[in-house]
Image: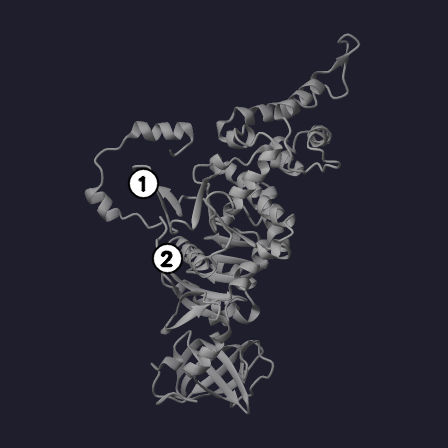
Amino acid sequence: MNMPDSPTAYLTEVEASRFEALAESQKPDHPLFQLGSYVAIEQAGIRVLAVVNRSALDARGVRLELIPLGEIDAEGFQRGVRRYPTPGAKVSEIADAQLQAAFAKYRAFGFGIGQVAGRSDLTAYLNPSALFGRSFAILGQSGAGKSWTVASLIQQAVATMPRAHLILLDLHGEYCWRDGQGALHSAFRPGTYRYLDARALEIPYWLMTYQELVELLIDRNDPSASVQMAFLRETLHTLKRKEAERLAIGFVSIDAPIWFSLEELYREFKTANELRTDFGKTKGPLYGQFDQFLVKLQSRLSDARYDFLLKPKQRTQSESLATLLRDFVGLGEPKCPITVIDLSAVPFDVRPTVSAQIGRIAFEFNYWNPRRREFPLVLVCEEAHAYIPRTGDKYDGTRRALERIAKEGRKYGVGLGVVSQRPHELSETVLSQCGTFLCLRLSNPDDQAYVRELVPDAESALVDVLPALGRGEAMVMGEAVPLPLRVKIRRPEPVPHSQDVNHHAAWREGPEDLPVEAIAGRWQRQGRA
């Protein structure tokens, strides 16, 4: 049914993923011709919903390029086109009732994230199970509104699903921060979140897998690396078997999360490295093989930045694992649906190690949780490109840990959300597993091309609109949304601590002096407090 005074267009060309239409109209400024407008294509019982991707004026009227999104039938909107119209089919502005039908099944979830662009009366609803049940990505250049979007999504998740379980890696102190007087502020309402400093949380060395310990302690370019790895495996297994006997555990894996003494590990290596027999005349079989290992381990132990990992004060016995897990998944005191893990005070080069540990703990927790289907977890990774890179060996362990969640997490109730301003630097494995994309403004051609390859084929042409998005606007595509939508994301309340610096005000009324000595002290202590 056409709107009053609405021009009518007719299909002139039909392809699998695009249509062309011509409207012999003298009203080129009509909403039907605006980019992003939804239109209905009707012919002999077929009703296809499409979006305007390009419009051009020529001598005959207005030419439109349309992207088909799906069909509208008696049951509502269905993704995909099964019956194609033919040239000559009528194209008209979509009736409100038809557009509302596309949202009918999603509205029941109550998970609204904002307003559909150009339709202030229409709220964009998502299916939270489809969003959080598979990996999802929030992509956008700096200043496009990623933190705003993350905060808004999480706030809405908790409002509609108060027993949610979300773990947020906060790399820059944007979601929990302290003011000049030391008072804690957050982008989430009191009672809904628990703030954990990654250093105080203490994710101890004995939770690390054998492979993670290899990456932390062994230089693979060392000619003796293979010998060091073999000795580490045997020694680690021996130490863990000793602890397993105390815990009355019959069989123990080398990756089992049970305590062992790092000092004892060091002594075993040192003894083997210096062993001489025959009254010191004959060198032992491993003499000098572990020089580099001992130097590297000693340097790590001497580096204060690694103290929370290698010199734990609380997690000094196997029994402390349960309290760590409670804190981690929001079941500590107080119980909260959001766990914000602050990595802002963790040195940059240590963050990948910590991030890998956090991701693996989330996966392992639900892997061993028999009620995983009733207790799904979602890990949200800010600035994911910094530690889940597309290429390179530097963060290989971190990448593997989080790629495992992307590939297998759905089976065990563990979801992954990645947030990045440089998607083309982010792991292709992770992005290819994402079921939903919330794309904010992206101007970089490499980023646009990368995203175009990853979104569903029928929606790839919509990537062209990304450079034109306003701040806080997103093109939402994928499984969690009934149809691709340009959405003005709902303002989070409270807002995250990520606003741009006001140079005009700061340079007019800012401080005349600073406590430089205190700044120097923080730098020297490698801590912001």
Mark yes or no: residue 226 visible. no
In the image, what residue type sits under mark 2? Pro
Image location of residue 415, percent across then percent down: 56, 55
Q: Secondary structure at mark 2?
A: loop
Image location of residue 242, percent across then percent down: 71, 28
Residue sitting at x 56%, y 29%? 310
Disc 1 packing (10 Å; few <14; some 14–19; many ≥20)? few
Residue extending farthest to the left is 508
Q: Secondary structure at mark 1?
A: loop
Residue extending farthest to the right is 278
Disc 2 packing (10 Å; few <14; some 14–19; many ≥20)? many
In the picture, the disc for residue 179 is 1
Please state, as top left, top right, bottom left or bottom right, where the N terminus lies in the image: bottom left
| Tags 2 and 1 touching, CB below 8 Å | no
Q: Between marks 2 and 1, how big is the CA–CA gap?
A: 20 Å
Q: Which residue is mark 2?
A: 492
Image height check: is 82 above or below 4? Answer: above
